[in-house]
Image (cartoon, rainbow, N blue to C red):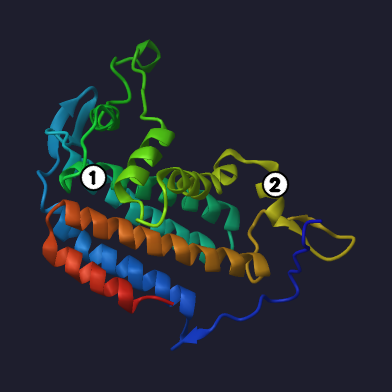
Amino acid sequence: MQPRISIAVQAEENKSYGNKMIYEEYFERIYGRLLHVFPLLESRVPQPQLVKMRGGECYRYIEKQLDQAIIAKTARLISALRSAILLNAAGLTLDVGTMKRVIDEIDADIMFLAGPLMGMEKTNRHDDFIREFFQEEFDHEEPLKSSQKRARVPRDKIRAYNARSYSASNMNESDAIRMMELIEKAYSGFVHGASVHIMEIYGGHPDSERFFVEGVLGTSRQKSSETDLANYFERALHAVILAAKALNADDVFEDLYESSHKVRL
C-alpha cells in the first residue's frame, strides 16, 4: 500500500549546517564550485561562432569536436543540477526525479566522450554520437518538409563502453553494465509519466486522500527525494572531474578532486 502523505505533519528535520540545512548547503557548495570552474574548462576548447541560419543567426560549434561536446554536456549538467535544487526546495519531487534521470544520462555521456581524449579506445560509435549531437533539427526552411532524422547511439552501447573503460578491477563488465542500466533506468518513469511514479504524490489524511499536484513540501517524500539527490550531485561532480582530466585542465582537475573530499556529507 502506498504510504500516506500528511500535510499536517512536517518531515523529520534535516541536520543543520550553520543556519542552513545540511543538504541545501551540500547542493549549493557543489553547484557553486562547478559554476566557478566551468569558464576555465570552457576556455580550453574552440568557442562557438555566430553563423547565419534560416531566419537569423545562431551560435554553433564549427569544429564539432569531442571536447566541445563535453563542454556542452557539462553546461547542460550544471543547469540540470540547478533545476534539481530549485524543484526540490519547492517540494516538486516528480520533477526532481525527471532531473535525476537527465543527470544520469549526461554523466554517462561525459564518460563516453572523455574516453578517447584520455587514451582509451575511440570507436565508430563516438563518430556517430558527434554526428548526431551536432546535427541541426531541421534541414528545410519549412519544418514540415524537413527530412532530418536522428540516429542516436543506443544507450546500451554507451553503457557497454563505459563499463569496459571505467569498471573497477573488482567488478566484471557484465555486472558493471547491469549496475549502470539500473541506475539510468530507475527514474525513467518520472520522464515518461509511469503510474507508479505519479502515485508518489498521492496521499494525505485518511478519507481525504488526493494528488498533491502543487508539491509535497514539508513531507517525508521531500526529505527522501533530497537525501537521494545527494548521490546525483556527487556523481555529477565526479563526471566534471573526469571532463577536466579529458580536457587536460590539470588545475581544475586538482581543484575539483580536492573539493570532492571537502563537500562530502
Q: Residue furthest bottom?
A: 18
Q: Relative to residue 94, is residue 120 drawn left or right?
A: left
Look at the numbered disc 1 and give the secondary structure of its residue. helix
Which callout, 2 or 1, points at the residue further toward the start of the chain? 1
Q: Nearer the viewer, mark 2 or mark 1?
A: 1
Look at the numbered disc 2 and give the secondary structure of its residue. helix
Label 2 close to label 1 by CB (< 8 Å):
no
Q: Which quarter of the figure has residue 67?
A: top left
The residue depicted at 41 percent of the width and 63 percent of the height is: 233
What label sits on residue 115 in the rendered view? 1
Amino acid residing under circle 2? Val
- Does the image show residue 212? no
Q: Relative to residue 209, is residue 166 drawn left or right?
A: left
Q: Is residue 190 above or below residue 253?
A: above
The residue depicted at 19 percent of the width and 39 percent of the height is: 66
- Of residue 173 and residue 137, the one placed in the foreground of this image is 173
Q: Relative to residue 223, is residue 255 drawn left or right?
A: left
Q: What's the distance in space between the residues labelled 2 and 1, CA to CA?
A: 36 Å
Q: Is residue 89 above or below residue 187?
A: below
Q: Which quarter of the figure has residue 58?
A: top left
Amino acid residing under circle 1? Gly
Query: Tag 2: Cα neighbours inside 10 Å, few (<14), some, or many (≥20)?
Result: few
In percent of width and height, residue 115 lies at 23, 45
- Of residue 72 and residue 122, the one placed in the foreground of this image is 122
Q: Residue furthest right?
A: 207
The residue depicted at 12 percent of the width and 44 percent of the height is: 47
Q: Which residue is mark 2?
A: 196
The residue depicted at 18 percent of the width and 56 percent of the height is: 245
What label sits on residue 175 in the rendered view? none
- Of residue 101 and residue 156, the one placed in the foreground of this image is 156
Q: Quadrant of the C terminus?
A: bottom left
